[in-house]
Image (cartoon, rainbow, N blue to C red):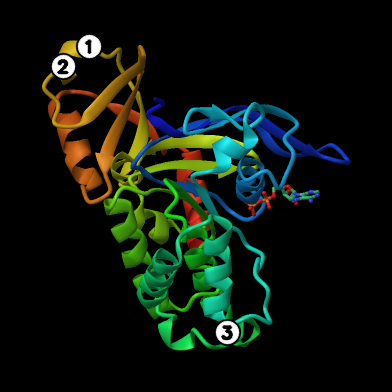
Amino acid sequence: MSENALKIENLSKIYPGDLVALNNISLEVKKGDFYALLGPNGAGKSTTIGIISSLVTKTSGLVELMGIDIDVNHSKAKKNLGVVGQEVNFNQFETVLQILEQQAGYFGLPRKIIKERSEYYLRNLGLWDKRKEQGRNLSGGMKRRLMVAKALINNPDLLILDEPTAGVDIELRRSLWDFLIEINNNGTTIILTTHYLEEAEKLCKNISIIDKGEIVKTSSMQSLLRELDTEIFIFDLKDEIDSKSISNSPFEIKILDTYQISVEINKSQSLNEIFGYLNENNLNILSMRNETNRLEELFLDLTEK
Ligand code: ADP
C-alpha cells in the first residue's frame, strides 16, 4: 500500500501557443495530510487540480492517486477522490437535497445511508435550512458549500478543493475551515489551493508554493512560518574572518568567504544586538545589505492582494 495519497512527478502542461502553465512540478502528499498549494493568480494551481481530476490533459509527467497511476487505471485511481472545482457542477433547477441524493445514488449507496449522510453534510455545512431550495437560488458561498457536500457524499479518502473559500464570506469561511479540520482529523486527506496565506496557515500541515508554473518551495507550514519570521543580512568585513571568533555566537552566522558573513536574525531581534556582538568580537563592518528573498517577495505580493 502506498503511503502517499497523491504523488506528482515532473508534471508539465503547455497550452496551445506555447503557454507554459506547469513546468516540471513534483510533489508528494502523505495520507492524512492537510496540504496547501499556495500561489498567486495564474500560478498553475487550477491546472494542477484539473490534471489530477482528469479535466485537463497533461503534456507530460506522472500522477498517482493512492499509489495508482491515473493513466494506467483511471477509474480505480479516482474511486476515492472528491474534487471541488471552481465551476458550479450541479443542476441548478434541482433542490439541494435532490442534488446530494442523486450524487449518492451514483455510488449505489443504500437509501438509509443516503438520507443520513445528506443530512449530516448539509447540517455541518450550514445548508440544512436550504435543502428544499433550488440550486440556482443559493448565494455564491452556498453553492460552493453544496459542492463540498457533493464531493464528500461517498466519503472519499482524498478531498481536493480549488480555492474553497472564494466568494464565501468571512464568518462562513471560519465555519468551513472548522469543518474541514474536523474531517481531516477523522482521516480524510485534504489538499487545497489558495491565494490566502492566512487560509494555508490556519489549516495546513504542509505546503508547496507555486509561482509561474514552478514549485518554489515545499515545506511544513511550521518551518515556513519560522523562515518568514527571519531575515538574512550580509556583512562585508574589513579583516579576514576567523571561524573561532564566531563559534559561540547566539546568532546563525555563516561564513560566505574570507571577508563575508551572513547572519540570520529573527524579525523581533534588534539589529543593535548583532552590531554589538560583532563589535565585541572585533569584526569590523565595511558594509551590510539585506539578502533579497524570493519567498518574502512572493508573500508580500500574496498578502497585498
Ligand atoms: P491559478 O489556478 O493558479 O490561478 P491556472 O492554472 O488557472 O492558475 O493558470 C495557469 C496558467 O495557464 C495561466 O497563465 C493561465 O492563463 C493559463 N491557462 C489556464 N487555462 C488555460 C487554457 N484553457 N488555455 C490557455 N491557457 C490557460
Q: Residue at x 42, y 82 (%)?
A: 128
The quadrant the N terminus occupies is top left
Q: Of residues 243 and 297, which is closer to you in this image?
A: 297
| x, y percent for residue 162 | 56, 56
Q: How much space separates mark 1 and mark 3, taking CA atoms?
A: 69 Å
Q: Which label sits on residue 302?
A: none
Residue 37 in the image, given as x and y percentages of width and height? 50, 46
Give the alpha-carbon distance from disc 1 to disc 2, as whole Å. Answer: 6 Å
| Dot 2 alpha-carbon crowd within 10 angstroms: few under 14, some 14 to 19, many 20 or more | few
In front: 101, or 25?
101
Which residue carries the number 1 mark?
242
Residue type at numbered disc 2:
Ser
Mark 2 CB within 8 Å of ligand 1 = no
Total numbered badges shown on the rendered structure = 3
Query: Which of disc 3 and disc 1 is earlier in sequence?
Result: 3
* 95 left or right, relative to 47: left
Circles 1 and 2: CB atoms closer than 8 Å: yes
* Marking on residue 245: 2
Amino acid under disc 1 = Asp
Q: Toward which corner of the image does residue 13 lie, by quadrant? A: top right
Give the labeled residue for mark 3: 138
Q: Distance between the residues labelled 2 and 3?
A: 67 Å
Left or right, 140 with respect to 246, comes to right
Alpha-carbon neighbours of circle 1 within 10 Å: few (<14), some, or many (≥20)?
Answer: few
